Amino acid sequence: MELILREYNLKLKHTFTISRESIDFQPSLIVELKSDGFSGFGEATSNPYYKTTVPMMMIHLEKIRTLIEATKNETPEEFWAMIHPYLQHDMFALCALDMAYNDLYARKKGKKLYELWDYSIDKNPLTDYTIGIASIEKMVAKMKELPWPIYKIKLGTKEDLAIVAALRKHTNAVFRIDANCGWTVEETINNAIELKKLGVEFLEQPLKADNWEGHKEVFKHSVLPIIADESCIIEEDVAKCQYHFHGVNVKLVKCGGLTPGRRMIEEAKKLGLKTMVGCMAESTVGISAIAHLLPQLDFVDMDGALLLAEDIATGITLDFGKITYSDRNGTGVTLI
């Protein structure tokens, strides 16, 4: 098996702002695994909050190139278990590698990933589209630029309720709110009351990740469901979220790929938690992988490729929230 690493700097259509940062470009690593005439692709983007960079991921993968390239017919689960000890300090790199291996494995089997996993795609949820923090005028303009059935609105400003009220005047779409750790307990409980009146479906990660007492208080008193993101990183975190959150947002780059991501979703379901998968401004490479998890999800945020000025791959397509799979096997991805 041959390992190929490609570094990209994805340009965004608009400056993307959340409560803690703004970006115009998203560095991304694409991993390709080649074997027996087939190629599998995976992706992980850099993220300062999690202290990960593309050069760092490439260094960590290069260190185990020999081990990776010696792999022959292991299942994705066996491959992940073999590689995890070497990359447990860099889940982002592990994600890109695991994603590529799952893709390659399914292509060799002549199946799409969801077929390999025996998932039915009959009731796939629609994806939301994210509106980053900006002036109210710019946020309204972004929303009008792409009519969509569900919007995920980034908040964490001094005029959060005014923003949502202004956006509501221009659409009947479902709203989801992501404060990215930007609120206090009191703000969350009070904001939830007003936001529910404005047609908000749920709140995502309103408090800082480690404020477990605060999460418990919000869980008890919020009139809207609360979904964990920064508080739910790896598999062990799912159980901790029970009785603190109503659901979990699994990010593949944070947990180490599709293989552990599927286990996290299964565990969340057993605990009665709502399931969601989110993206990290990936191209269609990473987004196409997420799409194969849809049958197991209540919610999904997989609009990363829509936020880009120019994509680097083809795969799944999105139309007014609905996902259409590629005719190709695996994740269905081809680099442009």
Image: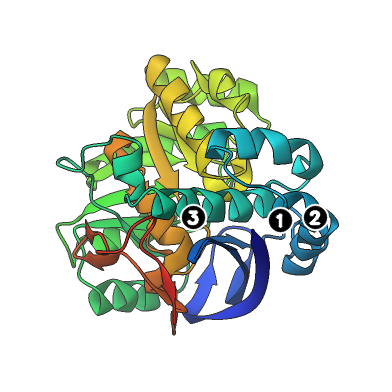
Q: Is residue 306 shown left or right of residue 101?
A: left
Amino acid type at image mark 1: Glu
Dot 2: few (<14), some (14–19), or many (≥20) neighbours within 10 Å? few
Spatial CA distance of label 3 from label 2 is 18 Å
The quarter of the image holding the C terminus is bottom left
Question: In the figure, residue 266 lies in which quadrant?
Answer: top left
Closer to the chain start, of discs 3 and 1, is 1
Provide the residue designation for mark 2: 66
Provide the residue designation for mark 3: 104
**Image height check: is 65 above or below 88?**
below
Q: Is residue 36 shown left or right of residue 309?
A: right
Residue nearer the viewer, 9 or 173: 9
Q: Is residue 130 shown left or right of residue 280?
A: left
Local SS, label 3: helix
Question: Do labels 2 and 1 touch, CB within 8 Å?
Answer: yes
Asked whether residue 195 is in view, the answer is no
Local SS, label 2: helix
Q: Position of residue 275 (x, y in %)?
A: 38, 33
Q: Which residue is drawn at 75% across and 48% down?
A: 90
**Image height check: is 14 above or below 188?**
below
The quarter of the image holding the N terminus is bottom right
